[in-house]
Image (cartoon, rainbow, N blue to C red):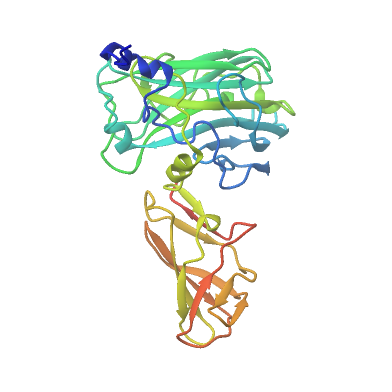
Amino acid sequence: MSRARDFADLAGSADAGGLTGRNLIINGAMNVAQRGTSSTGQTTGGYKTVDRFRTDQNGMTGSYTQATDVPSGYGFSNSYKIEVTTAAGSDAGTLRLDTRIEAQDLRNSGWDYTSSSSFVTFSCWVKSSLAGTYYFGFRTDDGTSRQYTEAFTLVADTWKKLEINIPGDSSVTFNDDNGMGALIALHIDERTAQSDSGHTLDGWQNYSASSRTPDFSQNWSETLNATFHTTGWQLEVGEQATPFEHRSYADELFACSRYYTNLAQFNADNFGSFHNATEAKVALKYPRVMRAAPSVTTNSPFTNLVEESGVAVETPATVSVNYTRQSGCVVAMTGLTGTSGNGIFIRQATNDTTIEADAEL
C-alpha cells in the first residue's frame, strides 16, 4: 500500500494542527510564568504573572494567577485568571489584558496588511463569572495608530472559543524593527468616561486614548470576586482559525526570554574577579539575546550567593548594574572581603528571584 500523500493532504494538515510556526503570539497557552504563578493585592497594571501578558488596570484591586481551569478536550494545562479582590467604585474600574507583538514579526509574517482582502485570524478561549458583552481589540502602533474592535458575548461560567478575522487596512503601518507593532487585547471592563458610544465595531478607525470601547453593562470590576479566565491565544495569517499550536515548554521559555528573564535561569558559570579587597564585578550572560538592552533589577543583599573561588561564600552590602547590553550585563558588588584579582562567581538562586532583566514591549 502506498504511503504517499498528495498536496491536498499536506495543505489540509494545518487544519489538523500539523504545521508549526503559525502562531505569532508567544506563550498563548499560558504555560510560562517566570515572575511567579500568582500575584495578589495589585492596584496597578503591568506584567504580573504569566509571561508576555500585561494588564491595564484602574480602580479595583485584583489577583492574577496561572490557573489550571481550562476548556476540556483541547490539550491545555493552564489559563490566566483575574479576580476582583476589592471592587472598584461606581463607574471607576478599567481592566484590559493584552499581549504585544514586535513590528518586524508582523511586517514579515506574510500578511498583506494594507489589503482589505488579506487577513490575520485571532482565536482564544475565554470564560467570565459575569454574563455580558466584552470586547476584543487589535491596535497598531506605527504610523497613525489604528484599531480594530469586535464585541463578543459570554454566558456566565462557560468557556467560549473566540475566532476573529482581522482584514488589512490601507492606513496600517508596521516598521521593520523591534518596537511594538500591535497590541492585542481583551477588554474586560471600561469606565464610561473612557468609552465612546460612536466607536466603530467590526472595522478600523484611528486610535485615541479617550475613545476605546463602548460601555460595559455587566460592571465586572465593580463586582467583588468576579473572575475572568483565558487561554489558547493564537494569531495566524489567513482567514481560517486552525487548532491551537501547542509548543514545548522549552520553546516557549526560550521565546519569552527575549523579553524577560531572571537569575533562576542563569548557570553558575558567571565568573568575575575582585576589583579590590572589598568590591567585585561579575559578568552575567542572559540565556538568549534579548529584544533590546534590558532594564536590570537587582534585589540585594544576595544572601550567601557570592563566592570567592575556593575561599568563602559572602553576602554583599550593595549590588548594582553598571553595564547592560542585549546579551548580558556586569554586576558590581561592594561590602565584600577578599583578595584583589581572585576569581568570584554568583551562585544560582534556588528560591527568590535576585536579578531580573526586562526588555518587554
Q: Could you tell me residue 322's position as x and y percent?
A: 43, 69
Task: Please say if 126 is above or below 182.
Answer: above
Residue 57 visible in the snapshot:
yes
Q: Could you tell me residue 153's position as x and y percent?
A: 57, 13
* Total numbered labels placed on residues in the image: 0
Q: Could you tell me residue 353's position as x and y percent?
A: 59, 57
Q: Quick one: which residue is furthest to the front in this view?
A: 1
Task: Please say if 84 is above or below 253.
Answer: above
Residue 117 appears left or right of 202: left
Rendered-image quadrant of the N terminus: top left
Residue 361 visible in the snapshot:
no
**Front residue of 206 and 321:** 321
The residue positioned 62% from the left and 25% from the top of the image is 70
The residue positioned 27% from the left and 24% from the top of the image is 171
Residue 313 appears left or right of 7: right
**Front residue of 265 and 48:** 265
Q: Could you tell me residue 298's position as x and y percent?
A: 55, 63
Q: Quadrant of residue 44?
A: top right
Task: Please say if 86 is above or below 356.
Answer: above
Task: Please say if 113 is above or below 98.
Answer: above
Rendered-image quadrant of the C terminus: top left
